[in-house]
Image (cartoon, rainbow, N blue to C red):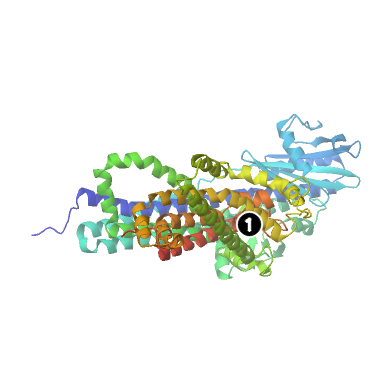
Amino acid sequence: MKSLIRIPGRDELIASLVAIILPLLIIMFSTLFVIKKSAETNIQKSIENSIELFGRYASILVLSIEQQRELSNLIRDYKNSIGLNTIAIISEETQGDLAFLKKRRYIIYPGSEKENKLLSSEDKGDKKIFDLISRTDQKNLSALLRDDSVVHYVRRIDKGDKTFYVYLSERLFTSNKLSIPLLNSLIASCLSIIIFGIGLFFFYNFRHAFGLIAIISFVLYSLSGKEVIKRWNASIIKDDIIELSLIIDFNKNKKLNITPEEIHKIAPIKVISKIAPSNIIPHSESSLINQIIRTYKDHDARYLYILPFSRAPYEAIRVDIPIKKLLEEGIGRYYLVLLFSSIVGLLIYILYAIGFVETLVNNLIKYSYAYGYIAPAIISTLILIFIPFISGITLSFFEHDHGEYTFVGIDNYIKILTSEGRSFFEPLSFYYTFLVTILWTAANLIIHVTVGLSLALILKNPLLKLREVYRVLLILPWAIPNYITALIWKGMFHKQFGIINELIGYFGIEEISWFSSFSTAFAANLITNSWLGFPFMMVISLGALQSIPQDIYEAADIEGASKWQKFWKITLPLLKPALFPAIILGSIWTFNMFNIIYLVSGGEPSGATDILIVEAYRWAFERGERYGYAAAYSTIIFLILLGYSLVTNKYSKATESIYR
């Protein structure tokens, strides 16, 4: 009986393992990375929320208690009750209006020898407190700092004519919950490999269908990662509930004259209500998280939470804040990473299905010594070009705000293409800047090609004396770094001290304020870049001219062709293979010529002469650190240049041989 098992060859087996394992690894580790970052972010937010809540309640204690001894005892009990790492009350002793005359003293510092001592600028810990205090004022009452896995928090308290500060710190802890998602992913990946193996060994003709089923099954499993993120997001609400319950219980046990309404004002959870005993759920972390998830599903993630927090049998808390956004935070980013990694994984498998992977594996084994030589170049290209390129595109789907990144999808692209409500001809409009960029590129190319080709034709003349000297002198503008040339020309265009205005003054022309209008600022940029760009076209044209066989010109002379006819019928067509790629390359360089625009005109007047690449820079570093917006700008620039290169190369046929 013929065996149903087919044993693949070595190359095919290696290619098959690569084709199934590599996509699974890419999908698994990319999604686990997002889950890990989500866990770290949630831990950080939870600690920051708790330290903010505890600090606000401590400030209420300072305002409510007049006797320092009573306040000191309360703060000590409060620290032990809520389990804070560090809490201290600092008084400000003012000896004048100047900041350096203000001294701060620890009046309450449970468990520390610094109590009743002045803060010292020489102490490392006190320096952080000084830094936080400097960030507070009567409008910004609190400041928070993360340093060395510790969260530091200071809140300002103005009590009459005295100023106090509450200082709290708490350590960031790491999550050990990633082991379960990792184990589940490993099990799911093993099952996917088994599915593929069944197709490879038992149903060889349908192996690719089994492979696609295996990858798609793993992708569908990976969708469950959103539930892990939801549960960790729900844990933030759970922590808020438990921490608020600790404060309420402490307040009741001490029988303080602080009303629940005062506590509700400082808490992220707003309403206290009475509920029936049947609605009480046992007080535990897991039950709270389950109830949050269940209520999220039952009530479309709006309000209506009934969650117990206190030891009192009938007292509970109702969350009156919409938590849909909170529970789903990070899921959009997870979906994007899963989509991208799935596409990459499927592309790898498709390459295997068409035989590319097997051929590659065979070549790697057969020509391993050759690939060893080019491996450094491949690795360098991957690290220096492809990884930053992919990171930039990924960043374009996020919005940056004070160190926090929020997934916004294609919102940055929509804002750019709609110019955020600006008029079409306004300098900050994308379309205005795009038109300026096109004008800038076209004008420069015309000058570069015209001047460069003209000089090349002159230098080609064998009767010209000192040709080598002229060549060296004409290449110098290209050899000098362009930022140095840009700064020199900027000085030359200075209204009062620039040599340009000095020269035109000899002809009776009034001095020009070069950067006060669009036309003159654009002209200054154009002159500077023309000086930098024509040597490149000259060198390319000169090399191409010297490669044209002289017998073609001799034949044209015999036929009686004029110099103009020889130029149009012989020289230009034979220059095409060298000149057109140079024009395409030069246009891309000019399109992205950042240094000249930024250093010469600086975009003046009012950003009117900025081009797209300069706008991308300004959005990233000069207009609120909008890194995602700038990354989207850069991606659009890349797509424009990619389309331009493909179209020009197709219709100019610049890469085809003229002699074919």
Secondary-structure class at tag 1: helix
**x and y, in percent, of residue 153 in the image:** 72, 44
| Residue type at numbered disc 1 | Glu
**x and y, in percent, of residue 603 in the image:** 68, 55
Q: Residue at x 77, y 38 (%)?
A: 130
Q: Let me know if residue 253 appears in the view.
A: no
Q: Which residue is mark 1?
A: 615
**x and y, in percent, of residue 536 in the image:** 51, 49
Task: Work out whether residue 168 or residue 632 is closer to the camera in this orientation and state it.
Answer: 632
Task: Work out whether residue 604 or residue 514 is closer to the camera in this orientation and state it.
Answer: 514
Give the image quarter of residue 380: top left
Q: Residues within 10 Å of mark 1 (few under 14, many from 20)?
A: many
Q: Let me know if residue 62 appears in the view.
A: yes
Residue 379 falls left or right of residue 407: left
Residue 401 falls left or right of residue 298: right
Give the image quarter of residue 216: bottom left
